[in-house]
């Protein structure tokens, strides 16, 4: 069998090209520090690496969500702290009203501060996050939560939605609360019923907030305590007209009890005076503050007016305490969310570390082995090139010269 010079040259050239390809591939592996350059190099490892990279990307997105959720909840916590501080100041002013020494000038000055605090709380309720979304609008994040109507009342424009964000594969946390939940969900009175005095009363009687010891926390209908004389009262159902308590003797400070309701009437009611006991209703903070302003405006200093003032003051103080309870519950929720975010973030960071460790084992190059291999391949290539040059010179004509 004869081997032509062309075959020898072709075989030698192909071997050199193969060795060059091996050297080039190893050099690319070293430059990228990757064990395989294309999926075809190791399909199983490439598929595993792609799945792990997807998990890393998803987990890192959860952490970015966590940062956003943490910022929103910290902002809400800060806003609620401001609301609480303003409410505490108004409550302090209301308690000072109870000493009964203020004149009209002092009362108007006090009213002016309550108006300022009302506006401040409304401003906080309309707070926006760093991306321009309203914090307390529910799902309507582009809608201003509270606006004034023609009568000066604050009207809620949002909805009851609560925005959520996933901070891990199994954890979603709220990033907002609706204004209705924060500012408009508190009950009036003692949370079962509220008391008030008839505006037409002429005596000096006032009624306390009272308490409820009934089997369930509700009243079937509103009730009215009617004084048929200064020392006699009866209780009737407003809707049914039923007499609940027939004519009963009364002395100032007596406890009046019926159907689980327990209240005291202090002072001296006049014949024809009446007091109302109605089921508690939900009332927003802004209405409570506006009622305080109205209460100050209506004060005249007469015995009847002072009695009305005392009844209204006790009622509004109870409403304030209920508002504090509501906000405290929301703040507790915010604190729980922040704890959940912190836990999820820590877990995510551990997962990312584990994922990256596994990914490194799958696709990262052993640099020592690769450098040794490159040295060996380079030497082999140089030897092949030198041999090729020598073989090219093996011609019969070189021996015939």
Image: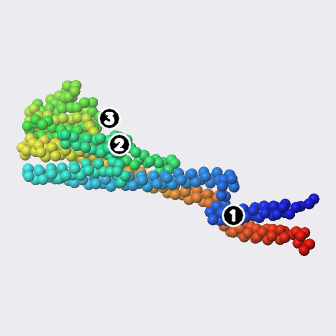
Residue 263 or residue 140, whichever sits in front: 140
The spot of residue 89 in percent (x, y) is: 22, 54
Residue 316 or residue 213, whichever sits in front: 316
Report which residue position mark 3 lands on: 216
Report, in whole angstroms, how far the alpha carbon at label 2 lies from the one at label 3: 36 Å
Task: Single out the residue that lies furthest toward the bottom.
Answer: 401
Residue 172: which numbered mark, if any? none
The quadrant in which the C terminus is found is bottom right
Report which residue position mark 2 lands on: 140
Neighbours of disc 2 within 10 Å: few (<14), some (14-19), many (20+): many
Please give the name of the residue rendered at 15% of the width and 50% of the height, measured from the top-left corner: 111
Residue 81 makes an appearance in the image: yes
Neighbours of disc 1 within 10 Å: few (<14), some (14-19), many (20+): some
**Do callouts 2 and 3 mark residues in contact (Cβ within 8 Å)?**
no
| First along the sequence among labels 2 and 3 | 2
The spot of residue 349 in percent (x, y) is: 52, 57
The quadrant in which the N terminus is found is bottom right
Task: Single out the residue that lies furthest toward the left.
Answer: 302
Q: Secondary structure at mark 2?
A: loop
Please give the name of the residue rendered at 12% of the width and 37% of the height, measured from the top-left corner: 199
Rendered image quadrant of residue 248: top left
Q: Nearer the viewer, mark 1 or mark 3?
A: 1
Report which residue position mark 1 lands on: 24
Neighbours of disc 3 within 10 Å: few (<14), some (14-19), many (20+): few
The spot of residue 367 in percent (x, y) is: 66, 67
Quick check: 345 left or right of 318?
Answer: right
Q: How is the image coloured?
A: rainbow
Residue 391 or residue 352, whichever sits in front: 391
Please give the name of the residue rendered at 28% of the width and 41% of the height, measured from the top-left corner: 156
Q: Secondary structure at mark 3?
A: loop
């Amino acid at each position: 069998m004869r081997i032509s010079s062309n075959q020898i040259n072709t075989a030698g050239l192909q071997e050199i090209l193969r060795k060059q390809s091996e050297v080039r591939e190893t050099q690319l592996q070293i430059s990228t520090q990757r064990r395989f350059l294309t999926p075809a190099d190791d399909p199983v490892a490439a598929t595993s690496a792609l799945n792990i990279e997807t998990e890393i990307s998803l987990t890192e997105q959860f952490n970015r969500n966590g940062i956003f959720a943490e910022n929103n909840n910290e902002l809400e916590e800060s806003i609620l702290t401001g609301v609480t501080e303003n409410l505490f100041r108004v409550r302090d002013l209301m308690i000072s009203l109870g000493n009964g020494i203020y004149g009209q000038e002092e009362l108007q000055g006090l009213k002016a501060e309550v108006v300022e605090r009302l506006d401040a709380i409304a401003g906080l309720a309309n707070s926006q996050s760093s991306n321009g979304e309203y914090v307390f609008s529910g799902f309507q994040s582009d809608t201003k939560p509270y606006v004034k109507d023609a009568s000066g009342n604050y009207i809620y424009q949002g909805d009851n939605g609560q925005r959520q964000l996933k901070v891990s594969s199994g954890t979603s946390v709220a990033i907002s609360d609706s204004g209705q939940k924060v500012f408009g969900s508190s009950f009036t009175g003692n949370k079962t019923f509220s008391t008030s005095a008839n505006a037409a009363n002429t005596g000096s009687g006032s009624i306390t907030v009272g308490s409820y010891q009934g089997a369930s926390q509700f009243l079937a209908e509103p009730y009215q305590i009617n004084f048929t004389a200064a020392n006699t009262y009866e209780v009737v159902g407003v809707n049914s007209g039923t007499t609940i308590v027939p004519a009963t003797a009364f002395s100032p400070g007596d406890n009046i009890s019926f159907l689980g309701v327990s209240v005291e009437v202090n002072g001296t009611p006049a014949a024809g005076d009446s007091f109302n006991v109605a089921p508690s209703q939900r009332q927003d903070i802004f209405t409570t503050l506006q009622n305080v302003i109205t209460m100050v405006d209506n004060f005249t200093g007469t015995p009847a007016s002072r009695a009305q003032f005392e009844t209204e003051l006790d009622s509004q103080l109870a409403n304030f305490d209920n508002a504090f309870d509501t906000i405290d519950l929301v703040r507790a929720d915010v604190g729980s969310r922040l704890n959940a975010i912190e836990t999820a973030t820590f877990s995510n960071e551990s997962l990312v570390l584990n994922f990256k460790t596994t990914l490194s084992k799958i696709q990262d190059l052993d640099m020592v082995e690769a450098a040794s291999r490159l040295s060996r391949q380079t030497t082999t290539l140089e030897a092949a090139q030198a041999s090729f040059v020598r073989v090219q010179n093996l011609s019969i004509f070189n021996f015939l010269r």
